[in-house]
Image (spheres, rainbow, N blue to C red):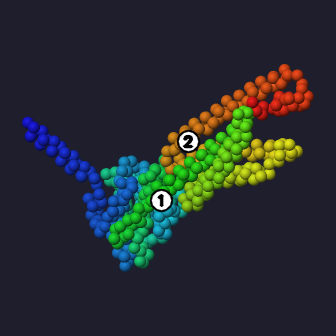
Amino acid sequence: MTMMWRVMLGMCVLSSVLVKTSLAQTCKTQSFSNNKVFKNCHDLSQLTSYLHWTYDQPSGILDIAFRHGGITTTNRWVAWGINPNNDLVTPMIGAQALVYLPQSSGNPRAYTTSIANTATQLQESSIRYPISDLSATYSNNEVTIFATLTLPNGTSSIVHVWQDGPLSASNVPQEHRHDSGHQSSMETLYLVSGQTQQGSSGASTRRKRNMHGVVNAVSWGVLMPMGAVIARYLKVFKSTGTAWFYLHVACQVSAYIVGVAGLGTGLKLGDDYPVDGTDDHKALGIIMVALGTLQVFALFLRPNPNHKYRFYWNVYHHIVGYATIIISITNIFKGFDVLEKFGDYNSWKHAYIGIIGALGAIAVFLEVLTWIIYFNRKGSENKMPPHGNGVNGANGVNGYASRPQQV
């Protein structure tokens, strides 16, 4: 009986291994309905895709079959392309692509397009490589694009990209997703040896975007309003002495320095990895830094408390400061909208809403508290007889009249 159980267990394990092996498709197990055979093939790193090719280097003739699996519906486009500039940083821009587009008739359409920018809808156009025998098939949830291209003499490697995306109701290609798989579907392929070099820019770009978002959310979105809360409310309490002023300056100057670095990373990202719909975000970022710079320089021009221009300086300082905070918070949410193009950042947005909401609740509480202190002090002053230049000074209690300066 024990021996029978062991035999059955062994058969189950063997069966599961065989099933797993049969399901683990690689390019070497694939064949084509037109019986085409290629000299080389490669399992691409992303999006369940495979590339088969035969390359004759002296003539530059590249015969390819690009296969993309996992297409379970007929309302998705598929594309494969070559970046003629060998740009592994932004390979989509300038890519010369072959596109599969399903048709209501059931016969798929294959055509070429030259991608000029990220807003492309893959409109049909000529490409810079001579091409022939372009066709596409769809079978068993797999799209295959066939083509023969003629590359420039001496070409030994290409930077190629591949993507899939949804179609509109009118069968027009729409923007693909921006998860890690779609962001990393690129590599350098050495046509003769078959070796590849992965494009790390997808993950690297995501890290840079995340760093830009965190730096600016913390500096402009947290430290800057926190410094304003400190300046407005903590100076009321006698126990803080002059510490409120130094805390205020520390928060604002730190926010400004880190925020300038955040702007720099944002401008660099915009140059290296252009994304549509970021003009407002960029413009508000520049305005924020300009206003922050004015605030920093205003510190060096701050008149003495009794100077006749101090009132006007205070008005300027408050207006520019609160305007900077309002624009900062607005721009942080615009930044979240940009990040949403590249993945799910709702948790980030909710976390920031929680932080800024808590800061706002603290500000409301302190506002109520300071008004209570103000009215209590005013009531105490009204009950006290005038003392002239006595112990408490000519202006009443502690020489501050009715101003809620310190408790």
Residue type indicated by callout 2 = Lys
Residue at the spot 35% in from the left edge and 72% down from the top edge: 192
Query: Height in image: 340 above or below 27?
Result: above
Residue at the spot 77% in from the left edge and 45% down from the top edge: 317
Measured as percent of width and height from the top left, residue 282 is found at: 63, 53
Side (left or right) of 330 relative to 192: right
Measured as percent of width and height from the top left, residue 174 is found at: 49, 52
Side (left or right) of 190 relative to 87: left
Q: Quadrant of the C terminus?
A: top right
Seen from the viewer's position, the closer of residues 203 and 228 is: 228
Q: Give the number of callouts.
A: 2
Q: Residues within 10 Å of mark 1 (few under 14, many from 20)?
A: some
Residue 280 visible in the shown view: no
Outermost residue on the right side: it is 388
Question: What's the CA distance linking mark 1 and mark 2?
Answer: 25 Å
Query: Height in image: 8 above or below 282?
Result: above
Residue 135 visible in the shown view: yes
Residue type indicated by callout 1 = Ser
Whether the residues at callouts 1 and 2 have beta carbons within 8 Å, the answer is no
Q: Earlier in the sequence, mark 1 or mark 2?
A: 1
Outermost residue on the top side: it is 383
Residue at the spot 51% in from the left edge and 41% down from the top edge: 347
Residue at the spot 28% in from the left edge and 55% down from the top edge: 25
Give residue 201's mark. 1
Residue at disc 2, secondary structure: helix
Q: Quadrant of the N terminus?
A: top left
Seen from the viewer's position, the closer of residues 31 and 15 is: 15
Give residue 349's mark. 2
Side (left or right) of 94 relative to 64: right
Residue at disc 1, secondary structure: helix
